[in-house]
Image: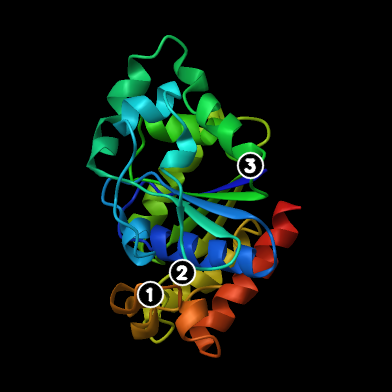
Amino acid sequence: MKIFASYNIKGGVGKTTCAVNLAYLSAQEGARTLIWDLDPQGGTSYYMCVKPKVEGGAKGLLEGKGDVGQSLRMTGYPNLDLLPADISLRMLDVEIHDMKKPDHAFEKTLKHLAKDYDNLFLDCPPNLSQTAEQIFRIADVLLVPLIPTTLSLRAYNRLVEFLSANRSKKLRVIPFFNQVNMDKPIHRAVVNNVREKHSIFMKNIIPDSSVIEAMGVKRSPVCSFAKESDEAKAFRALWSEMKERAG
């Protein structure tokens, strides 16, 4: 099972919309795909029309009490399931801190999931925390969406500094620009300059778009309700490049 984590220290950069659309594309290709909503705000759960509910709360999830499968929900899309969030996940950092072996916090949960899924997408909360550190340990690919602004780049640099001292050997970091408006001089300058100087950044970008914002009304992936839109094409191009980068 390959694990993709949609993560950024900074909030409001589109982690959830990217996780939902990329997971949808993975499932459309026939891969058995699961989205794990780790954000207590439950954005992914909302987009997927799933009531937020974690059996046993954050503690039960980590301790492996009961069957994780009781919390799994079908999304209505072939090959795509969801492990929803609820407000109990606000205590996830505390529960991880109190564990005897915090470095293996997600181990029991992943054992339950690995045999049933090919790809796991994590929609992560926006902070640098105990939860984030465990995500860095288990993830194969860290997808980092950034808005092309100074503050967003600053947050990314802080993340790189942290990962240089704490990342696992298997973790591949893949940053890309999201919510881009190329009519804005600052967006245009940042995107062009950064991609030219830093090959780690993906070539494909996701635009700032009312079609993507409509996910909140449609409660479904852009690649589902607007298949032929430029936005859906952008996500497909991003996913194709991402797969190539991730091996």
Residue 171, how many percent across, how many down?
Answer: 63, 39
Q: Amino acid at mark 3?
A: Asp
Q: Nearer the viewer, mark 1 or mark 3?
A: 3
Are the residues at dot 1 and dot 2 in contact (C-beta closer than 8 Å)?
A: yes
Q: Against 150, is 125 above or below?
A: above
The residue labelled by disc 2 is: 190
Q: Residue at x 43, y 60 (%)?
A: 146
Mark 1 / mark 3, whichever is N-terminal: 3
The N terminus sits in image quarter? top right
For the residue labelled by badge 3, is the local secondary structure a helix, a strand or a loop?
loop
State the separation of the CA atoms marked 2 and 3: 27 Å
**Closest to the observer, 139 or 151:** 139
Q: Nearer the viewer, mark 2 or mark 3?
A: 3
Figure label count:
3
Image quadrant in which you'd find residue 153: bottom left
The residue labelled by disc 1 is: 186
Q: Is residue 60 left or right of residue 117?
A: left
Residue 204 seen in the current view: no
Q: Amino acid at mark 2?
A: Val
Q: Is residue 33 left or right of residue 241?
A: left
Residue 34, how many percent across, how many down?
Answer: 54, 52
The residue labelled by disc 3 is: 140
Q: Residue at x 33, y 46 (%)?
A: 85
